[in-house]
Image (cartoon, rainbow, N blue to C red):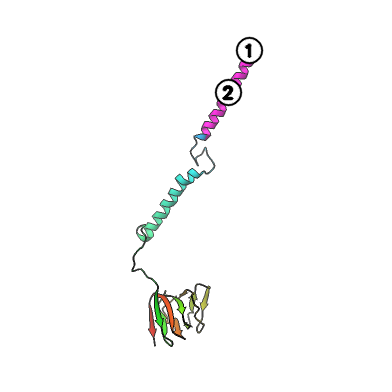
Amino acid sequence: MDKRKNRIKRLCLLGAICAVVGIGTTIALAAPGGENDPLISKSYIDNVVIPKITQYVDSKLSGITGGTSVNTDSSAPAFKVVEVKCGQTLIANEGCEMILRMGSGKIISTEKGGIADTTSGYDLANGSNMPSNHLLVVPLADGRGFIATSDVLVMVKGGYNINQ
């Protein structure tokens, strides 16, 4: 009877070992992020999610720019330093951007509004002082700009006219 009990114990122990090994093998061989692995692993992110996101972004960019290349054209719009003498006016075109670097000026606005000071988040009204080192954007080509109250150096991107 002792032999029989030992045999039953051995069989139960062997069955338990097989069950543990089988479950462990199933877990170890489960595909990351698959049905058998409900947790998101780093390998799933690296091998599945990031390539899908990259492909999606590349497809959207190619639709916008006609390709995924970066614009390295040196003729692309850039700021240029413009000198405006005291008493002269600079009238900006639509979308013109300005940064006052030296001197002082007064804003010229129209009935449709002033010039957007994107640095402080305000609309500069007619006659207000032009702030130094702030990015100013002219929304419409309707006569907006500034009059120099001293000699001015201003960085300008976009079209403009200087009048006496």
- Residue at 48%, 44% (x, y): give it: 44
Q: Decide: is 154 above or below 17.
A: below
Q: Which mark is residue 15?
A: 2
Question: Residue 139's x, y, as percent?
Answer: 44, 75
4 part of magenta stretch: yes
Q: Amino acid at mark 2?
A: Gly
Q: Quadrant of residue 21?
A: top right
Q: Decide: is 59 above or below 4.
A: below
Q: Decide: is 57 above or below 94.
A: above
Question: Residue 7's x, y, as percent?
Answer: 61, 16
Q: Amino acid at mark 1?
A: Lys
Q: CA distance from mark 2 to mark 1?
A: 18 Å
Question: Residue 47's x, y, as percent?
Answer: 45, 44
Q: How many marks?
A: 2
Outermost right residue: 1
Image quadrant occupied by the N terminus: top right
Please tell me whether mark 2 sits on a helix, a strand or a loop: helix
7 part of magenta stretch: yes
Q: Magenta span covers which residues?
A: 1-27
Tell which circle, 2 or 1, labels the residue nearer the N-terminal end. Answer: 1
Question: Residue 28's x, y, as percent?
Answer: 51, 34
Q: Which mark is residue 3?
A: 1
